[in-house]
Amino acid sequence: MAASPKVLTVENNTQNEEWTIVLPRKGRHRRNSQKIKPGKGQHQERQPWVPTDLEFDPERQSKLMHKIQICMKRIENSPFFSTFLDQMQNPEVLNHFHRVLGSELKLQMVIYGIGSIESHEAPRLQLSLAVMMKRKFSWIGDIEVFDPVLSATESRVLEALGCSVLSVNEQGRRQTLKPTLFFMPHCEAELYNNLLQANWEVESLNRVALFGNSFEAYEQHVSFKYYDQEVSFMDSSVVESVTHILAARRFTDELRIKTVSDDYFAAFHDSSWHFFKPACENELQLN
């Protein structure tokens, strides 16, 4: 897809069995591992969703909004965010965004798997980064959010921040009819695989920009497990849950982000930008 002549500008707005993939450690404070559930949900249909906690609490909403505002200010004034913006404005990365946008003016954002923004700081930092990106870049459009754990109070706060909370659990299977940025830090491998599978054609994949776990690290770990002969856990359903991730490595440009300090390690470690550039259907062969 030819690059658009538009300029991307920065504005001044300020209990099933599991097989656990432990990615290479990047620091002493690593908290999370990446989990693959064996095949569960791969072919589930989209299902209507409402928060399990329907009670709305104005006091909880006020407290949560205050926490989010603190996180946003913290992100905005951090060396991490400065470094992150510099990378996004690097000509190499901007060219990728130009290509994904094509002739469109806006890149819509879909946030999957954000987790509980009320209970944990890492999801609040991740959400803050996504909202700050929209405020800084005029070419980022509307934000849609989904996680089955979201409460009614959390949904209200997200809406107050200008986001739309999906009423359907898409299982990560959003088909890209227009250019879309999927913001998915620290999601399970299955969710990335579902997203790729739903868009496994040349035109659709070229409309995707993905911020999430490093696909390179997944590939390295699976290769390590194979050569270390620890493949007994990798039954057919587990292999299926990473098939598209591994196949996509052939035509993916991946750019790792820098967490800069331990303050942002828990929220963003092992995260990368991924841009997919299959040139023909033959590149989409899974074997």
Image: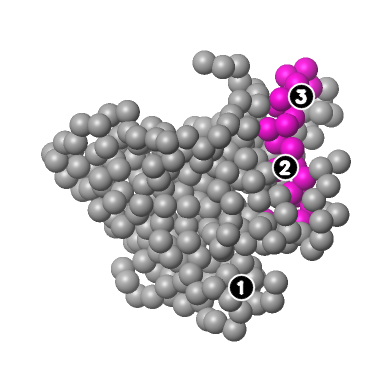
Residue beneath disc 3: 236
Q: Is residue 249 magenta?
A: yes
Dot 1: few (<14), some (14–19), or many (≥20) neighbours within 10 Å? many
Q: Is residue 12 magenta?
A: no
**Residue 189 x %, y %:** 61, 36
Q: In the picture, residue 202 is in which quadrant?
A: bottom right
Residue type at tag 1: Gly
Q: Quadrant of the N terminus?
A: bottom right
Tell me which numbered mark, 2 or 3, is placed earlier along the sequence.
3
202, above or below 245, in the image: below
At 36% from the left and 52% from the top, the residue drawn is 164
> Count of labels shown?
3
Q: Is residue 79 left or right of residue 226?
A: left
Q: Is residue 1 left or right of residue 153?
A: right
Q: Residue extending furthest left?
A: 59
235, above or below 169, in the image: above
**Residue 218 x %, y %:** 69, 39
Q: Secondary structure at mark 1?
A: loop
CA gap, disc 2 and disc 1: 24 Å
Q: Which residues are magenta?
A: 231-254
Residue beneath disc 1: 102
Residue beneath disc 2: 244
Tell me which numbered mark, 1 or 3, is placed earlier along the sequence.
1
Q: In the picture, residue 201 is in which quadrant?
A: bottom right
Q: Between residues 216 and 244, which one lies in front from this camera angle? A: 244
Residue type at tag 2: His
Q: Secondary structure at mark 2?
A: helix
